[in-house]
Image: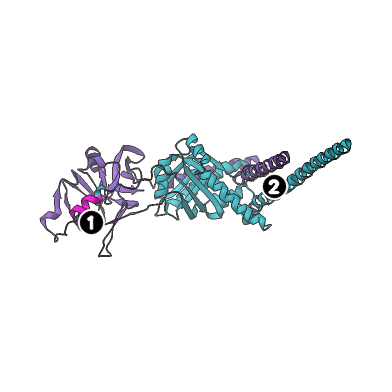
Amino acid sequence: MKDNSSDNFDSLFVKKQHGYKIFMLLFFLILFGIVGIYTYFTVGAVRSTMESAKTEVQGAEPVNPSLIGLMKNKAWVESRLKMASDDSIGMSIDLEQNEIQLLLKGVVIMKSKIKESSISGFFKRMDGNVYFNIFGSPLTIRHLESSIAKNALRVVQAPKDTIAAAANAAVKKDTLQGKSVYWTVKLDHDIELNIQGIDSITKAQNKYKLGKGFEFQRNLKNIKNSLEHIMKFQKPNYTPEILISIPENEAKAILMAIPKNASITIRI
Amino acid sequence: MIRAILIYLTILIVGIIFLASMILYAIPALQESTFVLPGVSATQTDAGNIESQKESINKEVEKLQVKLDKFTPTNAYIIVNTSDNHFFLYKGNQLIRDGKCSTGKNEKLTFVNSKKVYIFKTPKGVLHVQSKQPNPVWAKPDWAFLEDGLPIPPPGDASRFESGTLGAFKLVLGDGYMIHGTIYKRFIGQNVTHGCIRLLDDDLDVVYHTLEVGSKVYIY
């Protein structure tokens, strides 16, 4: 009786152990499946974006790789020249020299040294023709989103008399200090340009940890978009991105200066 | 029982961490890497032909650069940053002087019984110096009275004219905007003006004597 109950107990334990193993196996198989499907769709999205970019330049004579450097330089000067004929403020982003410039009628009115930058692999794998098709002319801002209001006006009511005027003067002004400065622009060819103002890398990392940071919100937005498509078994949209970090006050100055439909020239 | 729950919970947590790290970091990193795209194939071209092509591209770039450089004025011009309240005075590519200034306070003045509004901001773009004047007298516009809660005097009234408020010089930019001095020196470096550009006395002196009528004023 005693032995029998002991056997029953052991067999139960062995069954449970098998149960864990089966559960673990099934659980991880499902997880790998999800990850596999997600990877397949997201990688597929990058490839189809490149394919469609190549279709746009189909038939063009291939550019010799040893001439690409020089031709990039030519495209850069050409597009800056085109921008010079524009009446409004434009922006030049030179990732080769790590510099952003604001130009007005061809005159450099502001320079900002890029602290950090990263570009999508898409840009590194472009052939000469795709590069010139995209960056050979100034790109136009299609949509702009920013963490701080662009050129916001403070509304003030005119005082009735001199006493009210004195009281108005004592009102504390709004301040933007302490607010993270970052902005995202959607350009032609569905390129996304992200500029964030950081005064130190550590500060930017801390913001990221707190979930306030720009990269965190950007990643979250991308994942949400991808998941929405994958749930419907569709390829998610892929947007090649350029991420640039510059000093905070300069990021703010550029954001306030550029018009909402400004022209932007980029050299990679 | 508790042991079983703990084991299942551990498996679940490990699984969720794995999934989250893949979706949040690994797959986006893979997507942004160059691994997922094929490399650019090299094309063979005759070496002599390449050299001549390089030469012709370099010549074209030089020509384009000359055209681009022509946009920069050879005479004096000033650049005003309204965000940082800083000015830069140039002659060609040479920076002559820079310093703090005050620009528009980005304010909209509204009225209870009227639809009239005044917007106090410095215009952005390229303006020109239209005229220059030493010892300017400020002809106070209506908003200067309305802002202080005072009744508007008739045009030409003596209370409309103030000496010294604009400093030693003024450079007129059009539409009521000016570069001038100030008695409110403690506000230099801040967005406090009604759209004009205020400078400190020494800076104003240099700017006034360097810029000519017709000189360009780039404001951003």
How would you rate the neighbour count of disc 2 (Cα within 10 Å): few for under 14, some for 14-19, many for 20 or more?
some
The answer to whether residue A216 shows anywhere in this view is yes
| Numbered label attached to residue A35 | 2
Circle 1 chain: A
Residue A157 within the magenta-colored segment of the rendering: yes
Q: Name the residue under label 1.
A: A159
Which secondary structure, mark 2?
helix
Is A172 placed left or right of A250 in the picture? left
The residue depicted at 61 percent of the width and 40 percent of the height is: A66
Which secondary structure, mark 1?
loop
Q: Which of marks 1 and 2 is nearer the N terminus?
A: 2
Circle 2 chain: A
Residue A29, x across and y down, in percent: 75, 46
Chain letter matching colour cyan: A
Q: Who is closer to the viewer here, A214 or A166?
A: A166
Q: Residue furthest front?
A: A1
Q: Which residue lies furthest to the bottom in this view?
A: B114
Is B216 placed left or right of A8 in the picture? left
The residue depicted at 85 percent of the width and 40 percent of the height is: A8
Query: Residue flagged by tag 1: what amino acid is it?
Result: Pro
Residue A42, x across and y down, in percent: 66, 50
The answer to whether residue B43 shows anywhere in this view is no
Q: Whole-Å distance between the Cαs marked 1 and 2?
A: 63 Å
- The stretch of residues the image draws in magenta is A155-168
| Numbered label attached to residue A77 | none
Residue B124 within the magenta-colored segment of the rendering: no
